[in-house]
Amino acid sequence: MGNVNFKPIQTLQKTGFSAISGSTIVITNDLNDDNKTYVYQKEGNQYKQTQVIEGGGDSAAISGSTIVISDNKTYVYQKEGNQYKQTQVIEEGGNVAISGSTIVITSFEDNNTYVYQKEGNQYKQTQVIEGEGEGNVAISGSTIVSTSFGVNKTYVYQKEGNQYKQTQVIEEGENVAISGSTIVSSSLEDIKTYVYQKEGNQYKQTQVIEGGGEGTSVAISGSTIVITGFDENKTYVYQKEGNQYKQTQVIEEGGEGNVAISGSTIVSTSFGVNKTYVYQLQNQTSFTIEAEGGGGGGEEER
């Protein structure tokens, strides 16, 4: 293995489904009796809790100044000053992703994928992709990827005009992530993670990562892939060297929940110990927040 690059900087005493974009971390939790969403914003080298949103979910996503939380419905929050205010409730709920002005939701109930694009201050439904939508979903730029748990496949949609057209079906996939021209798809059946890089209009398989995490959750940002697995309770970091991703680090904490990455920051949750671990590239000082109340922000009710 190469050098260890990501250093622990913080342990948050909350767990759930996490997301990160730039200097903001979101943790949503409908587990246990919590049922809340916590917002942390970076001040210096620390993430401070600035808001508690009443109501948790099974999925969270953030892009720029917009947070999306989803359970049976999808709740949209947009930033006003230092707080996020609920601006919309979308009737469909499930797994959610957001990139720029586009929200994508895969629904467990009807196995469809719903696409919403921003018009003014609201998101308008512009497309329903029927079938192929009961699994995870990710979006980057003009490309949507979604998975179907039942058939272990990944579906690729690329934007043409105002609509997304299916351009490819990848035979592996239960958990999926995308960044730029790279798709990462993990299969719980064979405990492998598959890397696809774009060539022309298609994504070509360039690597199979064996072991190194079950692929219970995968994330990618730029040249870094992160993989976790429930059974091992570890987080695996792969960084790109040439055309391949090499394992450069095994993080012993986290890995039992989900993982997210934005730039130089990894967020990894552990359901078992009710904690979320924050790692940053380069040397930093580690510290723990032992107790958290409402933080600097108030509570936003649905």
Image (cartoon, rainbow, N blue to C red):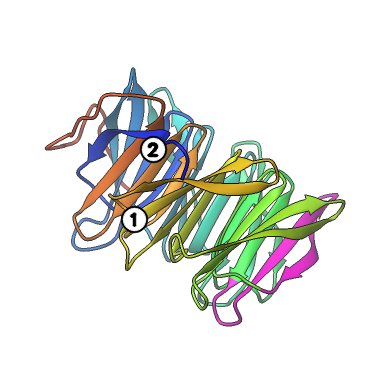
Range of residues picked out in magenta: 148-171
Locate residue 148, reporting x and y percent.
59, 74
With respect to residue 174, does 235 lie above or below? above
Q: Residues within 10 Å of mark 1 (few under 14, many from 20)?
A: many
Q: Residues within 10 Å of mark 2 (few under 14, many from 20)?
A: many
> Which SS type dominates the magenta stretch?
strand
Q: Residue furthest left?
A: 291
Locate residue 36, reporting x and y percent.
27, 51
What label sits on residue 54 in the rendered view?
none
Residue 161 horizontal side relative to residue 108, left or right: right
Residue 170 is covered by the magenta coloring: yes
With respect to residue 153, does 249 lie above or below? above
Q: Nearer the viewer, mark 1 or mark 2?
A: 1
Q: Examine the image and state in which quarter residue 163 appears.
A: bottom right
> Is residue 84 visible to us here?
no
What label sits on residue 25 in the rendered view?
2
Query: Which is more toward the observer, 57 or 206?
Result: 206
Element under disc 2: strand
Amino acid at dot 1: Lys
With respect to residue 241, does 244 lie above or below? below
Residue at image position (49%, 71%) is 191
Check disc 1 and report the residue beneath it. 234
Residue 287 is covered by the magenta coloring: no
Residue at image position (23%, 47%) is 14
> Is residue 216 visible to us here?
yes
Residue 162 horizontal side relative to residue 247, left or right: right
User: CB atoms at circles 1 and 2 under 8 Å apart?
Assistant: no
Query: Which is more toward the observer, 230 or 192?
Result: 192
Amino acid at dot 2: Ile
